[in-house]
Image (cartoon, helix red, strand yellow):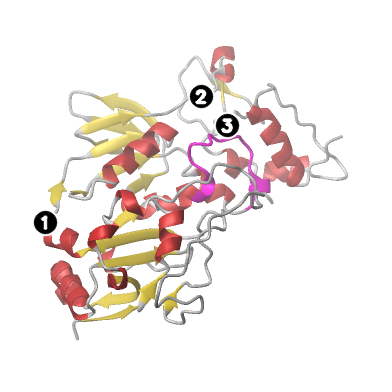
Amino acid sequence: MIGAFLLAKDVNLDYYKSHFHIQDAVLLNEHERKAHTRLIFSVINPIFERSTRFILKELMRLSANTCMYFEIHDKTIIPTIFHELVHVRSRRFPHFLDKKWDHERYIPPITQGQTNESTHIDGKERDPQDEIESPFALCFTTKRLLSEPKIVKNSRIVVVGASDTGISFIEALLSIGYLQFTNIVLIAPGGLSHHHIGDKRAQNLKSYSTSYTQQELKRLMLETRVRVINARMVDIDRSDKNIILDDDNKIIPYDTLVLAMGLQDKTLPSLGFASRGIAPISEDKKHLEGLLSVDDPKLYDHLRLGGTLMNALTNRRRPQNCVIYGRSLHSYACIKGLINRGMRPE
């Protein structure tokens, strides 16, 4: 037994084109319309994993396909062939509304031999013009990509900070189809934002940039493609090319270091204080019980539902006061998040 694969007969190519930047990665004119398929399920015997490329080429030859897609939903198990696929970024519609625009839409004509009720098309119920971001991530591969060997880059690339710059830098590296980076590390204090919020926008405690929405971050699947470390950098050893983390002075070596921490609030450091989740701290800084910064890497842990701090703030008998300093978007988002967690606004 070498492996088992399940393929769809046809795909809703119009939906892929309208919801993903697939035309930037695939020359669709070089592929016949019937040569597109979707991989639904795959499993390979671990003994033959080193021949994954050959197996995929034979799979496409036997099925008479030249382009194969793979959809990754929230509960999809990542297959062992994932490193041979190329990730396609989803399209962002030019609005923030949850309803369709009221404008005339172009309805493509039905070509000869094509019907509206094609029963063999996979995903035929999806509307290419629904103006709603796709709920899944998309990867693909072609015969040509499988025939071209990837150049393996083992350079140790460390990115400090999960800001827009850091994430876009990693995305740019991973989008190069002929290169395979095997050692990319992302140092993200507090983890990635969508780990804390998920699909519940009401649980948000701070404002985020619109360069990457929470859904886009989830569909990038950085946890699967790179190594994400939930820690904070405290020092850099430039002579030995190491960075030191606050996690028991853990050392991460690097060949290329990218610092992309982004903008951070400096109100507390200017007053000689450090937020509750910052440790270790310098001698000129000190902690104060109940004092938090919006950029605290453990902000969501401190203000989690059922935690000691939130229980004190939502206690009906002896309610505690909460003072929020500032008038930025972070302040309003924090106020809204605390109210949604059960704190009274009075």
Position of residue 215 measured from the top left corner of the image (x, y, whole percent): 52, 50
In reply to whether residue 206 is colored magenta, the answer given is: yes
Are dots 1 and 3 in contact, CB under 8 Å? no
Mark 2 or 3, nearer chain start: 2
| Whether residue 307 is situated above or below residue 296 in the rendered picture | below
Q: Amino acid at mark 3?
A: Arg
Where is residue 162, by image quadrant? top left
User: Of 245 and 59, which appears nearest the observer?
Assistant: 59
Q: SS for tag 1? A: loop
Q: Residue at x 33, y 78 (%)?
A: 7
Give the Cα distance between marks 1 and 3.
49 Å
Q: Residue at x 57, y 27 (%)?
A: 275
State the mark number for residue 264. Answer: 2
Where is residue 52, by image quadrant? bottom left
Image depth: mark 2 or mark 3 in front: 2
What residue range appears in magenta?
200-215
Q: Residue furthest bottom?
A: 1
Mark 1 or 3, nearer chain start: 1
User: Of 130 and 318, which appears nearest the observer?
Assistant: 130
Which residue is labeled 3 in the image? 276
Position of residue 163 measured from the top left corner of the image (x, y, whole percent): 44, 34
Q: Residue at x 39, y 68 (%)?
A: 77
Q: SS for tag 2? A: loop
Which residue is labeled 1 in the image? 149
Q: Is residue 223 visible?
A: yes
Position of residue 145 measured from the top left corner of the image (x, y, whole percent): 18, 58
In reply to whether residue 54 is colored magenta, the answer given is: no
